[in-house]
Image: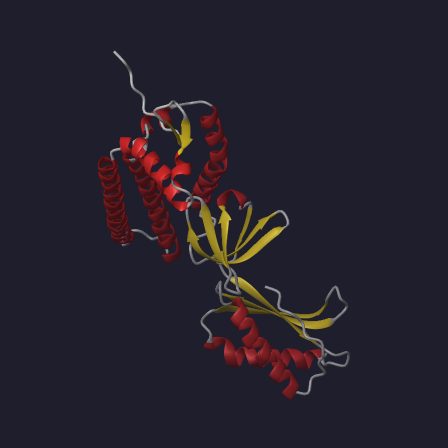
């Protein structure tokens, strides 16, 4: 049996056994076209382009269908989880922030699970041995394991944050990790990250493993400390009478105020002489009530002719 192999050379042999270039017969562009035509006939003619096109279309259609199923399941399971948990919360004493936290956590679990299934389906469609990849152990497995350490740390720390109720969605918190400090409102809590919106609107995504110290300003009543700068000739008895008059006239109008304590004259570390008043208020209201009552005290003292210092004192809460 004689085996024939397909070969191609830009030279052809004539009857006398002399080789001549194909490009020499047709100079310039026509010679190049002839060479390329011969190449496609000898090599690309072996491929079944019809079958290849059908396979590509099948895989593309499968990917589209899988993605549609993923979107439907994501929406359906998320709505079922939200409805089920809201119904269950009616029979519990969970506050609104805690309810939002648990609902967001359930949504995260659903999303991560469905994304894992989606990746599995995509790899299966392309014919990759997913089972062998998952069961295999070696350098790749070690590398993945090392890379997953951070992810697992996020999950573990997030679990303890949830279990210990360090904060819930809607809480005003300060997060500290060494020299890094962030303050704002918790807008989302997930398995891997916590989202905190700053006072200027910036949204911070913080991995749970980086949350070491949490200062929660939404648990219990807070203090709004008002320091009124006084001059050297201020009458302290008159100042106290003015402040008590303001308290009697306005504190009953604000349900968020739980109590008022007049600390009296104080000397700050900077050497300034102030008259201190502490407002005990509901969490989240301390800043607004500080500005409101600072203005009321200031206006009343000015009308009473009390000697006041010119330099302002910034709030301490």
State the count of labels.
Answer: 0
Q: How is the image coloured?
A: secondary structure
Quarter of the image with the N terminus in it: top left
Position of 28 with respect to 118 (left or right) is right
| 240 vs 111, nearest the viewer | 111
The residue at the point 32 percent across, 25 percent down is: 6
Check the image and report above or below for 78 versus 55. below
What is the x, y in percent for residue 288? 52, 71
What is the x, y in percent for residue 126? 30, 35
Quarter of the image with the C terminus in it: bottom right
What is the x, y in percent for residue 136? 39, 23
What is the x, y in percent for residue 307? 72, 83
| 33 vs 159, nearest the viewer | 33
> Which of the 4 image quarters holds residue 312?
bottom right
| 135 vs 171, nearest the viewer | 135
| 202 vs 294, nearest the viewer | 202
Whether residue 219 is visible, yes or no, is no
The residue at the point 49 percent across, 30 percent down is: 143
Position of 57 with respect to 176 (left or right) is left
The residue at the point 33 percent across, 38 percent down is: 37
The residue at the point 45 percent across, 22 percent down is: 138
Q: Outermost residue, top direction?
A: 1
């Amino acid at each position: 049996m004689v085996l024939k192999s397909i070969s191609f050379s830009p030279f052809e042999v004539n009857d006398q056994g002399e080789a001549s270039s194909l490009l020499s017969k047709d100079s310039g562009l026509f010679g190049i076209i002839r060479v390329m035509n011969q190449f496609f006939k000898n090599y690309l003619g072996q491929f079944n382009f019809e079958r290849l096109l059908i396979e590509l279309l099948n895989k593309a259609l499968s990917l589209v269908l899988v993605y549609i199923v993923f979107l439907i399941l994501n929406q359906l399971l998320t709505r079922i989880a939200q409805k089920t948990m809201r119904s269950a919360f009616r029979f519990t004493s969970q506050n609104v922030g805690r309810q939002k936290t648990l609902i967001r956590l359930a949504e995260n679990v659903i999303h991560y699970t469905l994304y894992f299934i989606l990746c599995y389906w995509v790899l299966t469609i392309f014919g990759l041995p997913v089972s062998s990849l998952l069961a295999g152990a070696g350098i790749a497995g070690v590398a993945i394991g090392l890379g997953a350490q951070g992810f697992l740390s996020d999950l573990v720390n997030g679990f303890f944050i949830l279990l210990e109720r360090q904060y819930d969605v809607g809480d005003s918190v300060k997060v500290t990790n060494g020299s890094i400090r962030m303050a704002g409102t918790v807008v989302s809590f997930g398995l891997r990250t916590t989202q905190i919106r700053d006072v200027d609107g910036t949204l911070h995504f913080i991995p749970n493993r980086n949350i070491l110290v949490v200062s929660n300003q939404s648990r219990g009543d807070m203090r709004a400390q008002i320091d009124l700068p006084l001059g050297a000739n201020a009458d302290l008895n008159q100042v106290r009478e003015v402040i008590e008059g303001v308290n009697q006239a306005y504190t009953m109008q604000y349900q968020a105020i739980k109590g008022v304590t007049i600390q009296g004259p104080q000397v700050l570390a900077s050497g300034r002489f102030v008259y201190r008043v502490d407002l005990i208020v509901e969490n989240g209201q301390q800043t607004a009530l500080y500005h409101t009552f600072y203005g009321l005290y200031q206006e009343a003292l000015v009308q009473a002719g009390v000697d006041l210092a010119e330099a302002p004192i910034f709030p301490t809460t």
